[in-house]
Amino acid sequence: MAGRRGPDRILDFLLRTGPFGDGFGAVPDGLTLDKLIAAPHGIDFGALEPRLPNVLRTQSGKIELATQQLIDDLKRLEVFSQEKIDEAQLTLVGRRDLRSHNSWLHNVEVLVKGKDRCTLQIHPNDASRLGVAQGSAVRIASRVGSVDAPVEITELIREGVVSLPHGWGHSMPGTNTKVASSRAGVNSNILTDEQRLDPLSGTSVLNGIPVSVTVL
């Protein structure tokens, strides 16, 4: 590893400390990055070895898809699904983009050029009801905050639902990314309500947030 730098050094370390690695000389015939490079057609380690159920730590020794905790929590889901939100509100969900991975690819010029992809997607019927036009600026507000974004009218989204992608908001204080800042977008986490939690997992509710949408 001494002569390697950057990703090659990391990859060599992972290969050598992995299940087939040479352990830095402890296993003379073990795998290294040099051996992998010398085998352009790959290295055959034989048939896959079964690991189940030995690696499972469940009491039943099986993959438990419907644990009692999940079954018990369905009652709360039934109550939630029957709750009625204000008719003026829409349900906000997130989305991903083919050329985006969270936030870090937004500083690569070739991946962010072109049309704005940090848009609020909305169904045509909702857009008509709210009086918003394609590309117009709107304010999306939840109980705890608001952000402004351009509208993208599309039938790909369900009526009553709007969508903002996550990973944007590069104009926030402390950011120092020239390319990303020029196409900053908005941080959808500003709309996340700290009072909306999933008690079973203890995580924040990042999808299904009640919001209002108004024209600017």
Image (tube, helix red, strand yellow):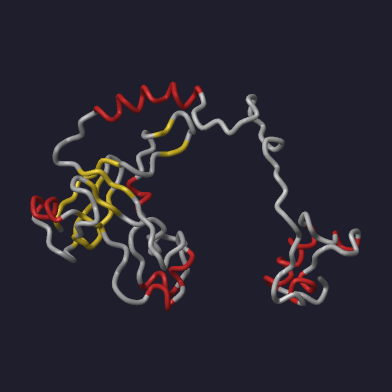
Q: Nearer the viewer, residue 10 or 40?
A: 40
Quick check: 213 left or right of 57?
left
Q: How many marks?
A: 0
The quarter holding residue 52 reads top right
State the residue at coordinates (73%, 74%). 5
Residue 115: give x, y in percent of width and height: 29, 73
Residue 49: give x, y in percent of width and height: 72, 48
Quick check: 16 left or right of 181?
right
Q: Nearer the viewer, residue 161 or 36?
A: 36
State the residue at coordinates (24%, 50%). 162
Quick check: 140 left or right of 204?
left
Quick check: 41 left or right of 85?
right
Seen as rendered, the residue at the extreme front is 47
State the residue at coordinates (69%, 74%). 41
Quadrant housing the N terminus: bottom right
Residue 102: give x, y in percent of width and height: 45, 59
State the residue at coordinates (33%, 59%). 186
Q: Nearer the viewer, residue 96 or 33?
A: 33
Q: Nearer the viewer, residue 212 or 123?
A: 123
The quarter holding residue 196 reads top left
Q: Is residue 9 above or below residue 158?
A: below
Residue 30: give x, y in percent of width and height: 84, 62
Quadrant housing the C terminus: bottom left
